[in-house]
Image: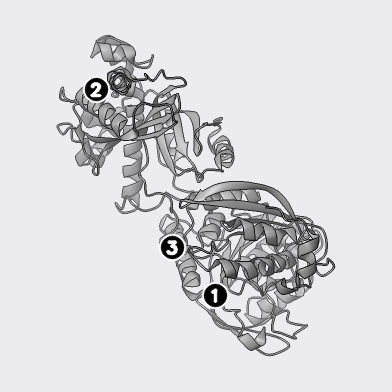
Amino acid sequence: MKLLTHNMLTSHVKGVTKGYPLLIKATEVKVNEVEFNPQFISRMIPKLEWSAFIQAAEGLGHLQNLPSTVVPEFENNEDFLRDVHKVLLEVEVIEGCLQCPESGREFPISRGVPNMLLNEDES
Amino acid sequence: MSTQNESCDGHLSTGANSLANDRERLSVFTVTIGATVPTGFEHTAAEEVGEKIGAEARISKDRGRIYFEISTDKLPMVHHLKSVDNLFVIVKEFENYPFKDSKEEALSDLMQLASQLPWADALGVWRMNNSLKKRRGRRRGGNNTKPKPSKGEDAPVPAMDEGDSVVTTTEKVQQESDAPQEKEGDRASSHEEEELEDDATKPLKFRVTCSRAGDKHSFASNEAARDFGGAVQDFFQWKADMTKFDVEVLLNIHNNEMVIGVALTEESLHRRNITHFGPTTLRSTLAYGMLRLCQPQVSDVIIDPMCGTGAIPVEGCIEWQDSFFVAGDNNDMAVSRTVNNINYIQKRKQDGGSSAPGLPVDTVQWDLCHLPMRTSSVDIIVTDMPFGKRIGSRKKNWDLYPSCLREMARVCRPGTGKAILLTQDKKCFLKAISRMGGLWRKLPTVWVNVGGLHAGVFALKRTSSVFGTTPEDDRSPREDGEARSKSKEEQ
């Protein structure tokens, strides 16, 4: 699971109102190189929930140089874009789980795939 | 020999001297290529041809076929086309062939035709194509049934088979197509590549496949194939073999149009990027066609919430690396196969020498009706919906379609978002959509044929209404008593 995907995932357990962002508990993390596309990163940044992204990166020990708020005029800042690219697309959680911040319910991650299926009573 | 040359294409001129001159240069000539594509996607295929090859494709009246001209140095590029199922090179096209009324005469005409056709160029392309195939097979460790090469692997300019300059009289075809001759330096490598079928002393094996459409013909396709095939056999002294053939001659008859071609691909290339199949794996060419309809933009988030074995996201993340794909399914096996298919592609990239083999794709196990995604976070939803005949059931679709259309509307970005959905259960789908006018606007449908079933690729545009503010959002499928009487049914 890449952090870009994590940024979009939320808990949808019945009754939960604040199911985002999910807390990552990783037992295995890998870095898988992906081709850098500055345009992609630059257009994706405004769509991200930046604080959730930083929080997740920090939790995985991959915060590196990332700032707590987006730098102004980042579109032309290649170093910044490369840093974001690495953490957003190359860091992958292979094993672990995602935890709902409100209910505490854990969704397992196995082989890089989070299992977000709910039981009958939870949906 | 000379009579054959006279009926051939212009630049293979008559006379031994001219033939010798032709052999001097590595000649590049123009041919017409035909391609079969999923019916309904002829236009997207023509677009791809224009984009990747720069050729203008024309769409045949015979559905599912497009034609375009290329110079032979561009041959490797046609194998990179993703919308195409099968490729063939045209020997000759007849726009209005005068088929005789009596079966005997019509078939006799076809038999005579065999010896009069300009085979040389087409067969030259056929042989160039064989060299290309062998190159690709060797690069991947000699396994010729593996899928087409990924983007980085462009085949070099094809070398002609040196060995053919020494031919026996039984192989007239190889003498004719010898004109494009390779340079000195390539002699050694082409010898290595020669396999059994290029052994100059063995006659080629062939078969004729005929497809015939129209109600005014006096003969059937198998009769045409048989008689035309017989004449081809006499002419070339090839051996007929239905299963292990080197050359496949295609005879396509559509009313008064007739096209004779030579196949450049084998049947089995429909699922090029999928190694782990499931019960209903979608053809890669169809997946590609659907993705083209979406017109993915840079940084678009594209999800397939019922991905099955992942055919669509896999095709997507290879061709549109500027977008991000999320493959999702509720089924364990589907998720596992999708992961395997993605890993296979990444490994293939890595083996091909890529230092950044990772792809912009992720997989999540989820329930389509309760997508664990933030509202308005998705740009495009593209999926192959359960048909109810092979997976699920009609009754299940009745409840499934409205719920999933609603959930898809929630996650899809208002105003700019869109959905491209393939389904055979058109009635159920249209009914479900008719009650969602506040969230989804219907765009033109593309009608396709999937495994013999007539299906529709429905394109929807997300309205700019915020989810939760339109009347249909809160209603569950069973409460629709009012809606049914109010809304018009689109059938």
Query: Distance from label 1 to label 2 (Cα)?
Result: 58 Å
Q: Which of these two is toward me, B201 or A37?
A: B201
Q: Position of residue B245 (x, y in %)?
A: 25, 40
| Amino acid bearing label 2 | Gln
Q: Quadrant of the C terminus of chain A?
A: bottom right
Q: Which mark is residue A113?
A: 1
Q: Residue visible at 25% across and 26% down?
A: B232
| Amino acid bearing label 1 | Val
- The kind of secondary structure element at disc 2 is helix
Residue at mark 2: chain: B
Q: Which of these two is toward me, B290 or B255?
A: B255
Residue at mark 3: chain: B
Q: For mark 2, what is the residue?
A: B175
Q: Earlier in the sequence, mark 2 or mark 3?
A: 2
Q: For mark 3, what is the residue?
A: B344
Do tag 1 and tag 3 residues touch (Cβ < 8 Å)? no
Check the image and report above or below for B248 versus B313: above
Q: Position of residue B81 (x, y in %)?
A: 49, 42
